[in-house]
Image: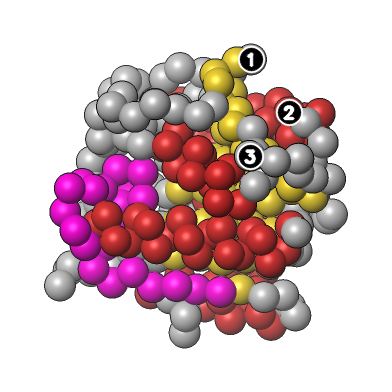
Amino acid sequence: EISKLHPSMSSCCPDGSLPALQEDTSRTLAGVVENKYYYVAPPEASTMGILVIYDVFGFSGGRIKSVCDSLALATNAHVCMPDVYDGTEINAKGGFGNTEAMAWLKSVTEFSTLSKLLEPGLECLKAKGATKIGAIGFCWGVYGVVKLAAEPGLLSVAVGCHPSLKIGDMFFQESEDSQAANVKCPLCIMPAGNDPDMYRPTGSIPKIVQANGIECKSIDFPEMQHGWVPRGDASQPAVARDVLKAIEEAVAFFKKYLA
């Protein structure tokens, strides 16, 4: 069992989270890197779009591009992941606890800045023909997804894997519950075993969204560590199983609201 320790306020991730995973270069990617984003075309003509917001380890973290490929193939949607960090990530800046690194992370997290950095991704999806757009985030990226989900009419659906909404509280005194209260589209969250209980099916986050008459589905992954989807060791059968399950759950949720 993964111990549930109180999260350190020097990091957006809870204690016991997985470290960065070296970029997986063993796979042939289906998408293309252009204009500071990674774009994957759907197998067939589609009006569905999915915006991907990566975790603190950035554009080349672990298998994040392969996750984009899987989403495009299984959902038959246009998928775009903008490089909001512009080629860098938290460790390259000095890591959690480093004053300059944390100042940088705060600057790119502030939503007036982050929203502009995400705009090329949204414009890419619209230009490709997407008329309904969903978003998925991982760890730090879930904060951006939830902020986008608070914008009226912008997203049709939102998904968050191992969410780190505490980043809003840490930097801007925006509590996790207050962020949830502003969500205006269906939300699916998938907490890991060492994520806070507020994200679980009986936690405050689903209850607050549901109280506003919006679907909020929480799927618990008690055996996983925070970060498992893009950076868990997929050579371990349980991790491979739950990476696949998380993607399948995300695909089903996207299809429900984008199709």
**Prevailing secondary structure class for the magenta stretch in the rendered image:** loop
**The residue tagged with tag 1: helix, strand or loop?**
loop
Marks 1 and 2, how far apart at CA: 10 Å
Give the residue drawn at x 24%, y 57%: 239
Q: Residue 27's spot in the image, x, y percent? A: 34, 29
Q: Residue sitting at 76 percent across and 44 percent down?
A: 46
Q: Residue 70 placed where, x, y %? A: 48, 44
* Residue 124 disc label: 2
- Residue behind mark 1: 35
Mark 1 in CB contact with mark 2 (< 8 angstroms): yes
Q: Residue at x 46, y 56 (%)?
A: 247
For label 3, the SS is: loop
Residue 219: within the magenta?
yes
Q: Position of residue 44 (x, y in %)?
A: 70, 41
Instruction: Identify the residue at the far front of this view.
Output: 44
The mark that comes first in sequence, 1 or 2, is 1
Frontmost residue, 133 versus 191? 133
Residue positioned 18% across, 67% down in the render? 2
Q: In the rendered view, tell whether residue 218 sits above or below residue 257.
A: below
Q: Residue 235's x, y, as percent?
A: 17, 48
Q: Nearer the viewer, residue 128 or 74?
A: 74
